[in-house]
Image (spheres, grey):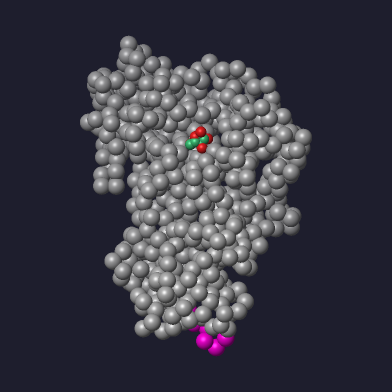
């Protein structure tokens, strides 16, 4: 196979080409990217009615020494449930196992690290004064850190906020938070939070996970879903107003599609903030009055439209506007650079979609003419029957099909809205928990999108994250537990496309008798040395090695023989996966390319993607 490249001709790939998509799925945010260590911090997860379960909190002590229940006495109007603790014992001797109270295991164990500091905040009310020990306890019952909070000089009969910074003296990846006492009497606790002090850019995100996203150099960040935005039923849909403002006042909600409670710590504001922190344009997906199982009639859609407009004001309005002032109070007086929104997620086939969509579209374009709008409906085969700036395209398929789809946009209409491939992945048996096979098929698909980037303006993989303890959807790009994380081959493949946004797609023609070779060439500017490079990417989706030649004409200067590199993603077995014990089994392998020139013959490994970076 030969790729003939004419470096004198090309076209710019959109600056926004390559991005990331975050959905609250698989505990991606709650118990993942969001640094909060306490699960069910507001005791709301058991429902708004009381008495309710306090799961996953457990009781420290026995029936004779402590009674724990819930009531609706919280000081927070939107989350009234608090835990009521009636301490029946008095003094350490009479409070087995030494003190009584409640314990939270976090999201499958808290990661507490030696010499790291953690801010614990909680709200408390009591029948008298309080004397509480706030502690991180290791899996073998060792105390990792502990502070005493005591108000012996005054009673705490009104709700009061308490804060304490704990420094760990040892590491445990499976720790819990305990609040205990030996003082007889009744006390109530609510909104108990434990956050590491050291978070990504100080904005509350777990550093390793945030960095893995940042390393993809995403030019946009689509959030917060996905079906999470829709909800199985409207009552469980994500509503942005419940996810902003002081964290302790957020009601949280049960995400019924992915079947878990989230306190919405990673809310609308945090998504906008993270986008800014990683240099990505936010793409906000909001609920359009449609869930998986119920729909708001178009004549009744006005409050939802106002909610979306208010959301735009929150992101973009001046700090003196109603919603912009809330954003400012959260620490961001300047508007966020929100330019693109999606009216819902995947509801094109629903009966109310078009009617509702048009109402949203008109209202948003009227209030914010520069905002670009994404429709749910696929226009790759036939034009849309409604106005849009982008149409959404989702694909989950087997590997052969994904590979074959590298040409799917070749015949897509060149007029009208541009395509946003906002969810793609090989799944099911070919993908396991993230195989080499999946990544290679996706590589071909991405090369196809790059070649069609006159019409495909944005692309991102889905889902981004999975907490290994809650695999609702597999495969995913980044796998993590309380303290470790690794990228699947699909994650690492994306690294080869980080240079594509804003690059020039060079004219190239592939001459081949193989059905398994797909290739492209781009010219990009290296962010570090500011020099121009050519990147030739080629996929071999076959089980045999292949000879591959690339031949470059039209260059102003010669390819430099030294300094070129070759990067390969491949492996001995197509079903190979990375894991916590072997996180680097399938990762890009970089070698220097000796005697680089305009005309090169190379051998491609079976099931591989190879990229050649040449300087000139
Ligand atoms: O990415 C997982 C799910 O797939 C998303 O929530 C939804 O948009 C799609 O069906």
Closer to us: 62 or 123: 62
Q: Is residue 280 visible?
A: no
Name the residue rendered at 54%, 28% in the picture: 393
Q: Residue at x 57, y 80 (%)?
A: 127
User: Outermost residue, top direction?
Assistant: 513
Q: Which residues, given as a range, are shown in magenta?
A: 149-154
Q: In the image, residue 423 lies at what x, y percent?
A: 49, 33
Q: Nearer the viewer, residue 250 or 493?
A: 250
Task: Using the image, determine if residue 64 lies above or below residue 33.
Answer: below
Q: Specify the quadrant that holds the C terminus.
A: top left
Instruction: Identify whether 158 is placed above or below 569.
Output: below
Q: Position of residue 291 (x, y in %)?
A: 61, 37
Q: In which quadrant of the rendered view does residue 309 lie?
A: top right
Q: In the rendered picture of this protein, how many numbered marks are placed on residues? A: 0
Residue 197 on the magenta span: no
- List x then y, in percent, for residue 181: 44, 78
**Position of 461 relative to 67 (above/below):** above
Tell which of 232 and 567 is nearer to you: 232
Residue 456 seen in the figure: yes
- Our reading of the magenta stretch's main secondary structure is loop
């Amino acid at each position: 196979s030969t790729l003939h490249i004419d470096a004198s001709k090309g076209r710019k790939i959109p600056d926004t080409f390559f991005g990331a998509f975050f959905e609250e799925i698989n505990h991606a945010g709650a118990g993942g990217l969001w640094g909060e260590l306490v699960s069910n911090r507001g005791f709301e997860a058991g429902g708004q009615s009381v008495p309710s379960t306090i799961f996953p909190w457990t009781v420290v002590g026995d029936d004779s020494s402590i009674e724990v229940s819930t009531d609706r006495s919280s000081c927070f109007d939107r989350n009234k449930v608090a835990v009521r603790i009636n301490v029946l014992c008095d003094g350490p001797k009479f409070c087995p196992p030494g003190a009584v109270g409640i314990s939270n295991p976090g999201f499958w164990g808290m990661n507490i690290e030696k010499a790291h500091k953690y801010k614990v905040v909680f709200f408390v009310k009591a029948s008298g004064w309080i004397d509480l020990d706030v502690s991180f306890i290791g899996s073998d019952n060792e105390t990792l850190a502990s502070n005493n909070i005591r108000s012996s000089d005054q009673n705490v009969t009104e709700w009061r906020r308490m804060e304490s910074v704990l420094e760990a003296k040892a590491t445990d990846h499976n720790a819990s938070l305990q609040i205990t006492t030996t003082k007889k009497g009744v006390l109530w606790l609510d909104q108990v939070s434990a956050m590491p002090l050291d978070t990504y850019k100080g904005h509350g995100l777990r550093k390793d996970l945030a960095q893995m996203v940042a390393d993809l150099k995403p030019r946009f960040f689509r959030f917060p879903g996905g079906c999470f935005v829709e909800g199985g039923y409207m009552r469980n849909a994500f509503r942005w107003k419940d996810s902003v403002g002081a964290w302790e006042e957020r009601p949280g909600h049960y995400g019924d599609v992915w079947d878990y409670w989230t306190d919405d710590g990673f809310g609308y504001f945090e998504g906008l903030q993270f986008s800014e922190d990683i240099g990505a344009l936010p793409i906000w997906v909001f609920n359009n009055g449609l869930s998986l199982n119920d729909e708001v009639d178009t004549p009744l859609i006005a409050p939802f439209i106002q909610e979306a407009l208010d959301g735009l004001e929150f992101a973009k309005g001046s700090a003196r506007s109603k919603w912009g002032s809330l954003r400012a109070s959260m620490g961001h007086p300047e508007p966020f650079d929100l330019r693109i929104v999606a009216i819902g997620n995947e509801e094109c086939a629903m009966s109310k979609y078009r009617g509702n969509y048009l109402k949203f579209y008109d209202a948003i374009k009227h209030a914010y003419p520069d905002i670009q709008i994404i429709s749910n409906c696929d226009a790759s085969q036939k034009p849309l029957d409604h106005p849009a700036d982008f149409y959404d395209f989702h694909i989950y398929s087997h590997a052969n099909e994904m590979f074959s789809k590298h040409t799917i946009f070749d015949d897509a209409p060149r007029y009208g809205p541009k395509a946003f491939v906002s969810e793609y992945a090989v799944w099911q048996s070919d993908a396991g928990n993230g195989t080499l096979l999946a990544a290679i098929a996706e590589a071909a698909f991405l090369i196809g999108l790059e070649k069609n980037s006159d019409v495909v303006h944005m692309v991102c993989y889905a889902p981004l994250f999975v907490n290994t303890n809650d695999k609702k959807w597999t495969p995913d790009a980044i796998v993590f537990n309380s303290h470790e994380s690794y990228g699947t081959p699909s994650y690492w493949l994306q690294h080869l496309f980080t240079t594509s946004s804003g690059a020039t797609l060079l004219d190239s023609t592939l001459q081949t008798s193989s059905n398994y070779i797909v290739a492209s060439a781009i010219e990009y500017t290296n962010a570090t040395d500011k020099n121009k490079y050519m990147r030739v990417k080629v996929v071999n989706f076959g089980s045999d090695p292949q000879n591959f030649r690339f031949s470059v004409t039209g260059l102003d200067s010669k390819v430099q023989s030294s300094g070129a590199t070759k990067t390969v993603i491949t492996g001995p077995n197509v079903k190979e996966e990375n894991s916590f014990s072997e996180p680097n089994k399938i990762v890009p392998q970089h070698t220097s390319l000796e005697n680089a020139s305009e005309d090169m013959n190379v051998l491609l490994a079976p099931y591989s993607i190879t990229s050649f970076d040449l300087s000139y």
